[in-house]
Image (cartoon, grey):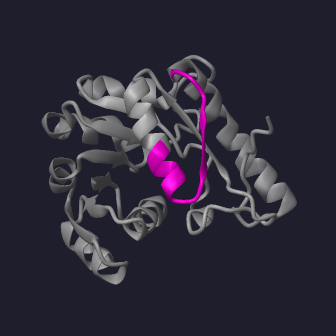
Amino acid sequence: MKIGILGGTGRMGQGLARGYAAVGHEVFLGSRSPQRAADIASELAGGISGGSLSEAAEFGELVVLAVPFGDAAEIVEAVQDSLAEKIVIDITNPFGAVPPGQVAGIENNSRAAASARWVAAYKTTFWKTLDGGRGHDGQPLDVFVCSLDAEAKAVVMELITATGFRAVDCGGFENARTLDLMVPLMIELDGRHQTDARSSWKFLG
């Protein structure tokens, strides 16, 4: 599968790119600095290329939104025609930029490209855990997934599982609101217990 990553030069974007390429997908890193994206892509594993945001949106059969939340809606709107009917994985975190407990980041961002098939994932995944996808006990780390589109959700969960994580179905966008609110607490706990950004929420059931 061809995967475009909007914001692919960031730590999350690069980590996801490595994981996707390792299991055989073609990946395109998109950036507002196309040359930087191309340079980073050349340093990563084979199967990864880089260029502009618009090129990444056009390239991907599936597109990952990995830009800062404050920039997300504007970037999505600019490439919305290329996202039509494609699965878009929204990994952005609002950090209080939307009303707590009222609107999830994905509910805000999806308005900018209503014809795309939106899935929230990797919300509570730290970038340092992307290589390997397993905790200190050797168990797969959990990635919580929310979507209103059951078929798109299934595709994303299969992709997550293929890269070594355990995908957990968390229902629709209303539960993405809870995931958004879990992130600041996760960061606070990580700092308090000095886990070096390698902690993760785990569903035991």
- Residue 160 magenta-drawn? yes
Residue at 54% x, 46% y is: 122
| 163 horizontally vs 58: left or right | right
Residue at 15% x, 49% y is: 58
Residue found farthest to the bottom: 43
Residue found farthest to the right: 193
The answer to whether residue 117 of the structure is visible from this angle is: yes
Which of the two residues, 2 or 104, is positioned nearer the viewer here? 2
Query: What segment carries the magenta color?
Result: 158-172
Give coordinates of residue 5: x percent, y percent. Answer: 32, 54
Location of the N terminus (image quadrant): bottom left
Residue at 78% x, 58% y is: 191
Which of the two residues, 185 or 173, is positioned nearer the viewer here? 173
Residue at 68% x, 42% y is: 184
Residue 50 location, quadrant = bottom left
| 78 horizontally vs 160: left or right | left
Does residue 113 sit above or below 38 in this rendering?
A: above
The answer to whether residue 91 of the structure is visible from this angle is: no
Location of the C terminus (image quadrant): top right
Does residue 72 sit above or below 196 in this rendering?
A: above
Give coordinates of residue 175: x percent, y percent. Answer: 60, 23
Which of the two residues, 177 or 118, is positioned nearer the viewer here? 118
Give coordinates of residue 38: x percent, y percent. Answer: 23, 74
Residue 77 location, quadrant = top left
Which of the two residues, 48 or 34, is positioned nearer the viewer here? 48
- Residue 115 magenta-drawn? no
Give coordinates of residue 121: x percent, y percent. Answer: 51, 41
Total numbered labels placed on residues in the image: 0
